[in-house]
Amino acid sequence: MTQTSKKDDAPITLAVINQPLCNRGDQAAFLALVERLKDIPGLRLLFLFIETDKAVRDFTGSVEGIQALAFPRLDRGQKWFRKMVRLPPILRKVMTVRPELRKYNRLIKQADYVLCAPGGVCLGKYRDWMHLWNLVNALDGKKKVAIYGRSIGPFDGSKKSDRLFRRRAVDVLQKAVFVSLRDKRSQQIAAELKIPFHPSIDTAFARTATAPLPDELAYLKTRRFAVFVPNQLDAWHPDFRKLPPQRLTTLYRAILDEILSRGYDAVLLPQLFGDKLIDHPYCRRLIRHADPNRTVLISDQYEADVQQAVIRRASLLIGARCHSVIFAIQNRVLFLALSYEHKIDGLLELLDLQDGSLPIAELLSDSGIARVSERIDWLEANRNSLLEKIKTAQQKARTIAGQSAALFASVIRKSECQNAALEKTPGPGPGGSAIQDTK
């Protein structure tokens, strides 16, 4: 049997799936991923989104050198994807007769590799069946699957569907040709489950944002301010959905009052944008009671680089989103993380910055704001030494991010060299014998 060979000058096609949208933090990681992947010679980047054209355009913006395709009709809901994951491979193959899925899989088939983009715990606490199906589908197509800069776990086993998700997710992670995990807790979970992985860090650290403040925000240069990034956890997060609606709002407003009482102006940066769950209306409700002359709500239309330009000017950041903390570290700004899951704790553990975090679940009682106030006192009293520690952490994070990108590039190059060796090896008969294993 003759193997179809690839021309030496043909590009390597990398299909990127599971890229989170509508989040400025994920946008920063996306920009860094694209920049690093472009450094790999001969690589063609194809991003496949199960989302609307508008959502894809708003997120990818003016990024050049990639092809981004949207397949909104593939989004048939979590129940449909759960059903697909539960089916045996032969029946999943039967389901590909659907025109949209057939077109999608044709692109997957043409790819040399399938890369799961950096992001959160979709394989874990969020139990995202569409995310899992995307990976299972690529493996069904005999593709080499890589998982880059992700967090995973924890995996719940209390219900039958939870156990199924865990089993399939672990199977995917074990079959991937490359897995890098971005936080200490995810790495510990992988080790316990015997999943091979490379320790990494959030991909956003692989790129430096250099955008200046836009002219219309230049007034911030003359103000002493703290950035506050809230997170409406009770609207979406599985651990907080049962909270009384006002509990988080009360805490966030108390934090705003604390910021203002210390002589800072308060600048709110919404990270979610688009047409679904967005932060801007929630932030607007939070500041209704505050002094309008000392509170600023930044538009959610500014991209990730502009958000970092704002944070760079801040004296303090208080953030209930992972990437707000990453932005603070990237720009060497004093911060307090309001941690809501292990990806934040695991990141700070990797960088020895755990003192800059408080678990938000423990701050929801009446005494919670007192703990916040005490921690800010400590941060301000140790500002100079902590800023040196953050500087060291930033440098470490950038080094890890660069090493992880180089490692992934070497995996692709090594694999392509092995493929080329196979294609150029003479077949059975006069002149040589078939190679069965390249290891």
Image (cartoon, rainbow, N blue to C red):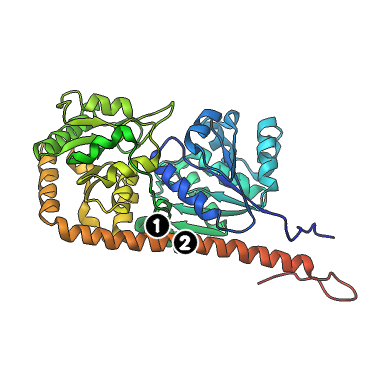
Image location (x, y in percent) of residue 231: 29, 36
Q: Relative to 4, does residue 82 appear above or below in the rendering? A: above
Q: Are marks 2 and 1 in contact (CB under 8 Å)?
A: yes
Q: Quadrant of the C terminus?
A: bottom right
Give 243 or 432, whichever is nearer the viewer: 432
Residue located at (23% from left, 31% from top): 296
Residue 232 in sight: no
Query: Quadrant of the image for the N terminus?
Result: bottom right
The earlier-in-sequence mark between 2 and 1 is: 1
Mark 2 is on which residue type? Answer: Ser
User: What amino acid is found at the position of numbered circle 1 in the picture?
Assistant: Ile
Residue ID for mark 1? 201
Q: Quadrant of residue 256?
A: top left
Left or right for 178, reference 295: right
Q: With 224 as the anchor, is 125 left or right in this view?
A: right
Q: In percent of the image, x 43 and y 55: which residue is there?
A: 206
Q: Tell me if 365 is positioned left or right of 87 in this view.
A: left
Q: CA distance from mark 2 to mark 1?
A: 8 Å
- Secondary structure, mark 2, is helix
Mark 2 nearby-residue class (10 Å; few <14, some 14–19, many ≥20): many
Q: Is 362 in front, or is 403? A: 403
Residue that mark 2 sits on: 404
